[in-house]
């Protein structure tokens, strides 16, 4: 898949089936739009092209909201490539670009630069100044500009607008990771570099791989989850380990910083510090809480591991003897 970031990158002989959007999360609604774009391209001997934007428009118009992307740009590009897209034009988004008249956007960028012969969008598509451009404007100008509009309406009996990145964020904020996965078409992931923590977990028999910071992606609500730790992310050597995952500030030890701490079931020998991993969330187990003492905390963690193992379909390994923990 080719990636274009400036007009000079675009081939002069391009003729495209084009779709437009952020595609944050690349959820099932996005997947259908991408599939129809690729199908239209193949049927008409065109190139399947995506026009996307970076940074996210919401972070430009409302920086105070501190929007976290469901999928960062590199991961979005990987999903787009897997969908069969031939090329992606990454448009730098700023306030000047946001003021583009929607008719100029169609004539100069969609048809002028990206040579769209087919434009594929859902009914919720918006573009141009004040988001005033929509599918009706595309339909109105299609004959004049020389392209066919392919409108994606109902998907699987559900309005595409319901399969939205906003809905995914709302579900994750409520800890409903299984429901979010239904929209995404896969478990939700965060990813980052494993950091050194306070190492309390290994002393209790529960060593953890810790992720922290602002660039992990959309972190679900505080709580304990069953899920997977993914090593060698996005490579042929990718491997998944079953895990019990804690999200929050560790109230039992009066923590202040929000972290993602994943205990890989039965493994205390993995050397993950300094490595990039992904953490996948499969099921919500319980809320975060403080306990009366260490014994009560360990008993609850034993129960969390047992429940995680059952959900993930793996053996219950129990806690690990602190004396044999060599890593994590």
Image (cartoon, rainbow, N blue to C red):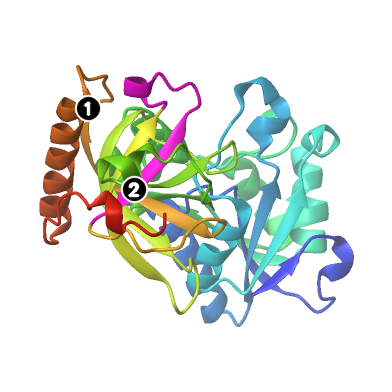
Please report the residue visible at 56 percent of the width from the left and 57 percent of the height from the top: 76
Could you tell whether 290 is left or right of 190 in the image? left
Q: Is mark 2 on a helix, strand or loop?
A: loop
Residue 217, position as x, y percentages in the image: 52, 43
Residue 148 x, y percent position in the rendering: 60, 62
Q: Nearer the viewer, residue 225 or 282?
A: 225
Question: Does residue 314 appear to the left or right of 223 in the view shown?
Answer: left
Q: Name the residue under label 2.
A: 207
Q: Where is residue 34 in the image (x, y as percent from the top left)?
A: 49, 62
Label 2 or label 1, whichever comes before in sequence order: 2
* Residue that numbered label 1 is attached to: 294
Camera sees residue 62: no
Q: Which residue lies furthest to the bottom in this view?
A: 45
Instruction: Spot the residue most to the front.
Output: 323
The magenta region covers: 249-265
Q: Which of marks 2 and 1 is in front?
A: 1
User: Quick one: SS at disc 1?
Assistant: helix
User: Is residue 249 at least partly visible in the picture?
Assistant: yes
Residue drawn at x 33%, y 53% is 187
Asked if the stretch drawn in magenta spans residue 299, the answer is: no
Residue at 81% across, 79% down: 13
Q: What separation in Å lies between label 2 and label 1 (alpha carbons)?
A: 15 Å
**Relative height, residue 41 to residue 222 (above, below):** below
**Which class describes the residues within 10 Å of circle 2: few (<14), some (14-19), or many (20+)?**
many
Image position of 106 with respect to 250: above or below: below
């Amino acid at each position: 898949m080719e990636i274009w970031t400036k007009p000079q990158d675009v081939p002069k002989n391009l003729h495209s089936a084009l779709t437009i959007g952020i595609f944050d999360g690349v959820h099932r609604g996005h997947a259908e739009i991408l599939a129809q774009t690729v199908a239209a391209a193949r049927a008409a001997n065109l190139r399947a092209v995506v026009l996307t934007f970076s940074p996210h428009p919401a972070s430009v118009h409302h920086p105070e909201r501190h929007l976290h992307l469901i999928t960062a740009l590199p991961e979005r590009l990987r999903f787009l490539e897997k969908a069969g897209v031939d090329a992606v034009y990454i448009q730098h988004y700023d306030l000047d670009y946001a003021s583009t008249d929607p008719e100029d956007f169609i004539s100069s960028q969609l048809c002028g630069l990206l040579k769209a012969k087919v434009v594929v969008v859902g009914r919720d598509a918006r573009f141009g100044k004040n988001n005033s451009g929509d599918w009706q404007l595309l339909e109105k100008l299609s004959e004049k500009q020389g392209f066919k509009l392919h409108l994606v309406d109902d998907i699987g009996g559900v309005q595409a607008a319901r399969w939205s990145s906003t809905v995914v964020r709302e579900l994750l904020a409520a800890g409903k990771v299984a429901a979010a996965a239904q929209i995404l078409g896969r478990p939700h992931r965060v990813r980052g570099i494993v950091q050194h923590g306070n190492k309390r977990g290994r002393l209790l028999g529960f060593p953890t791989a810790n992720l922290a910071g602002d660039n992990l992606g959309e972190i679900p609500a505080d709580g304990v989850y069953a899920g997977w730790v993914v090593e060698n992310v996005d490579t042929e050597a990718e491997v998944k380990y079953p895990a019990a995952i804690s999200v929050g500030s560790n109230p039992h030890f009066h923590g202040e910083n929000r972290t993602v701490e994943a205990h890989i079931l039965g493994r205390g020998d993995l050397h993950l510090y300094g490595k990039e991993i992904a953490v996948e969330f499969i099921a919500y187990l319980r809320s975060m809480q403080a306990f009366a003492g260490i014994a009560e905390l360990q008993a609850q963690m034993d129960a969390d591991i047992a429940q995680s193992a059952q959900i993930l379909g793996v053996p219950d390994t129990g806690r690990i003897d602190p004396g044999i923990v060599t890593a994590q």
